Image (tube, helix red, strand yellow):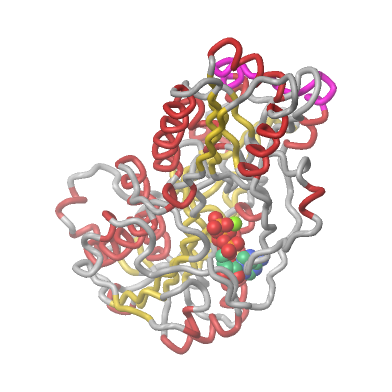
Amino acid sequence: DRPMALDLKLNQRKIVHGDAGYVLEDVPHFTDYIPDAPNYPNPLQDNPAYSVVKQYFVNTDDTVARKIVVHKGSPRGTHFRRAGPRQKVYFESDEVHACIVTCGGLCPGLNTVIREIVCGLAHMYGVTKILGIEGGYRGFYARNTISLTPKSVNDIHKRGGTILSTSRGGHDTSKIVDSIQDRGINQVYIIGGDGTQKGASVIFEEIQRRGLKVAVVGIPKTIDNDIAVIDKSFGFDTAVEEAQRAINAAHVEAGSVENGIGVVKLMGRYSGFIAMYATLASRDVDCCLIPESPFYLEGKGGLFEFIEKRLKENGHMVLVVAEGAGQELIAESMRSMNHEDASGNKLLLDVGLWLSQKIKDHFSCKGKMPINLKYIDPTYMIRAIPANASDNVYCTLLAHSALHGAMAGYTGFTVGPVNGRHAYIPFYRVTEARNNVVITDRMWARLLSSTNQPSFLTLKDIESVRHVYSPKYLPPIKVPVDNNLPN
Ligand code: ATP
Ligand code: MG
């Protein structure tokens, strides 16, 4: 439930001045300043567009609270710095040399974030030196760079993908930081998912170790919405919207034949948010399967029984399955498989194909009803489209938060909304945990009552699930040697 965050800070605040800038007592989870206080007036104060906005600048000690708990009678909680332009900036505009890099898989909105960082730095702060690093992390030392200007990025938000291209693997920290140092780069904008933010954190640490005055800023990208702390990730809305087209196609196919079954696989390796929201939005889905909610096929209360029931009632049905669902069920076949990609992520077996085959096998048994199954995997079509309107607005806010923070001299943080307000979140906060659908929360209950599917759980299971899924800490990801695998 939403804490009354911002009222709290007014009477709870107790500022302690430390080396790392301000620290709130009990809530010491702030990003660091680059050592040295910020000292130049923000050029935005002369900009007529901003002089009309009351309180345009954010106070340096303004905070956003994440979760408030009552401890010894008084409310405590993790606070983050509020994002936004500061009255004083650390960098003078003409000394800024920024670079932008995109890593990991594609996601709608990448180009919008790139565009808005470039245009924001140029138009708001008069920055002219902005480099695009091509091909992900390895681009720092093994690829070309391109110079980015408001003119060159003007139309890119209308295109899917990333104009900088991307890659997995290839994170060589010392070579990357050498390259940053050699080129005289002092603001690094890193757009990417959980792996990328871990990489950004390591770069940040190496930069601290070498004592460089470089701001390292992460912009979280994950179409699955699985990044911890932030309310929602960019591209997610677009993905849910585009998924409707696939679900609709499956519904039309299933409804046009006798005992038609449409199976749609959606993204979500560990978190079923896309599948859940796409199902809730569509109303054509009879059953939604996600990684967080175990299910079984055979026997009473199992998936086959439910499919049979729906086919008898309606003559057709639509199933949505998130890519990470049911992995324990196919674990057997997995043992003999190649199991990691170039970034060390576990490669999952295609649950869509597996489930489709299982359903076909089950209903082709003697005495069962003949079925007609169509399987749709729209993953790459969804990832490749440009961001929709709401994601474009959101990407703009993320980019602006990022560059205002870097200009003010903050470093080692990721940007994103926390309880509806944009904040600066230290890297370790977003990499230590993952955001999951909590199946004991209301949203999943809403889905169950909307589809009327079985929960596949007993009361005892629910108790253990409650235990397993509340804040989930992840084992460290192994970074393998670069073996140049395609994305
Ligand atoms: P997504 O999974 O959403 O597509 P991602 O950012 O998680 O995006 P990855 O391929 O896992 O994608 O990682 C992107 C980059 O981050 C790669 O270049 C990888 O080498 C690097 N990376 C991943 N994990 C780490 C880590 N623990 N430390 C340093 N670098 C890492
Ligand atoms: Mg990842």
Q: Is residue 288 visible?
A: yes
Task: Residue at the far front: name it.
Answer: 366
Q: Quadrant of the N terminus?
A: top right
Left or right position of 30 against 107? right
User: Residue 416 location in percent, x, y?
Assistant: 47, 48
Q: Which residues are magenta?
A: 446-463
User: Residue 260 location, x and y as percent?
Assistant: 53, 25
User: 91 above or below 384?
Assistant: below
Judge left or right: residue 387 versus residue 478: left
Q: Is residue 461 above or below residue 473?
A: above
* Image point (57%, 48%), residue name: 227
Q: Is residue 449 magenta?
A: yes
Q: Residue at x 22, y 44 (%)?
A: 53
| Number of on-image labels | 0
Query: In the rendering, at what x and y percent does residue 52 appear?
Result: 18, 45
Q: Is residue 420 left or right of residue 57?
A: right
Query: What is the quadrant of residue 73 in the picture?
Result: top right
